[in-house]
Amino acid sequence: METTQIFKESLFKGKVLLCSGGGSGICKVMTEAMVRHGAKAVIFSRSKDRLEKAAKELSEKTGGEVFAVAGDIRNPSDAERVVKETIDRYGRIDYLINGAAGNFLAPFKDLSYNAFRTVVEIDLLGTFNLTKAAVEHLKKSKGAIINVSATLHYTGTPFQQHAGAAKAAVDALTKHWAVELGPFGVRVNGIAPGPIADTVGMNKLGAIFDTKGVPLQCMGSVNDIANSGVFLFSEGAKYITGVVLVVDGGAWMISSNSNYPEMVLNPPKFNKL
């Protein structure tokens, strides 16, 4: 899907974005939107082949510059390395998207110790690791951070305690960092996507969502998230920090799954993890 451009093309000219999870899904489209508006970008995730393919594709689609660095966000030394390579290549970091995440459906009884820990390590520790590595550069540029969150923990979601717990903690970091980094001119916000069509996440989680109950009566698109990111990084949001912007058509405010008790008592068959 092509991104819809509604902001000035040169909005981020001369600026540099570092994005974890930028090789696929929502974060890939968020990166595309930033590059279309003039930013240079470095994308970071574990799969080198997929990442390099994504960087080439994004560069060709936008006419901009996208550079790939492979590594494991759970490893602080990899986080420090991608920051160093970004600085060596571009000399600055203005924007950071913490988007690397892991998720799957799992009833409590089937959720292993290792599976729970892995999601927390990717989502929460990965967000901390990359921000810790990049923060001094963001202070220099008076930049901004977006932590990609979720709405799973707002009301409680079956089979999602691992991701919900991790994202709740990410939301806490967003607020703590907004308070602590604000005096240095760094803004920190979150985006919490709801049901977004044609994404890996929705394909995985669609079994537990009934979008008929979404107040706006439809699923969102990746463009909705990308444009929200452009706005939060723009001068239009220069007095916004510590906010988690929910982009879900109002879905989190209601319970739309009438089959909830039966689904929990007799869960669908998932792979044990």
Image (tube, helix red, strand yellow):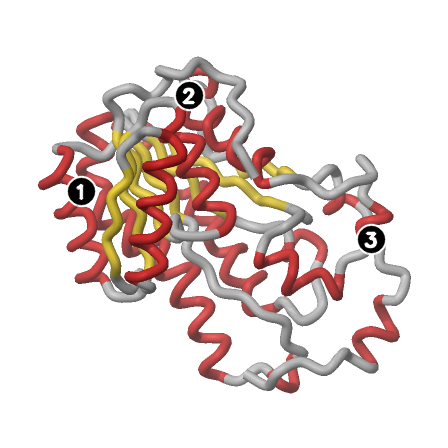
On the picture, is 85 further left or further right than 118? left
Q: Nearer the viewer, residue 256 or 90?
A: 90
- Checking the image for residue 43, the label placed there is none
Q: Nearer the viewer, residue 218 or 93?
A: 218
Q: CA distance from mark 3 to mark 2?
A: 33 Å
- Residue placed under numbered mark 1 in the picture: 86
Image position, residue 84 (x, y; %) = 13, 47
Q: CA distance from mark 1 to mark 2?
A: 21 Å
Vertical comparison of 23 with 110: above or below: above
Question: Residue extending furthest right?
Answer: 258
- The image quadrant where one finds the C terminus is bottom right
- Residue placed under numbered mark 3 in the picture: 255
Dots 3, 2 in contact, CB < 8 A:
no
At label 1, which amino acid type do we have? Thr
Q: Nearer the viewer, residue 112 or 268?
A: 268
- Residue placed under numbered mark 2 in the picture: 234
On the picture, is 236 further left or further right than 250? left
- Of label 1 and label 2, which has the lower sequence position? 1
- Of label 3 and label 2, which has the lower sequence position? 2
Question: Residue extending furthest left?
Answer: 88
Front tag of 1 and 2: 1
On the picture, is 155 further left or further right than 68? right
Image position, residue 68 (x, y; %) = 26, 49
Which element type, helix, strand or loop, lies under badge 2?
A: loop
* Residue at position x 25%, y 59% in the image: 70
* Residue at position x 87%, y 75% in the image: 262
* Residue at position x 33%, y 29% in the image: 63
Q: CA distance from mark 3 to mark 1?
A: 43 Å
- Of label 3 and label 1, which has the lower sequence position? 1
Which element type, helix, strand or loop, lies under badge 3?
A: loop
Image position, residue 196 (x, y; %) = 65, 46
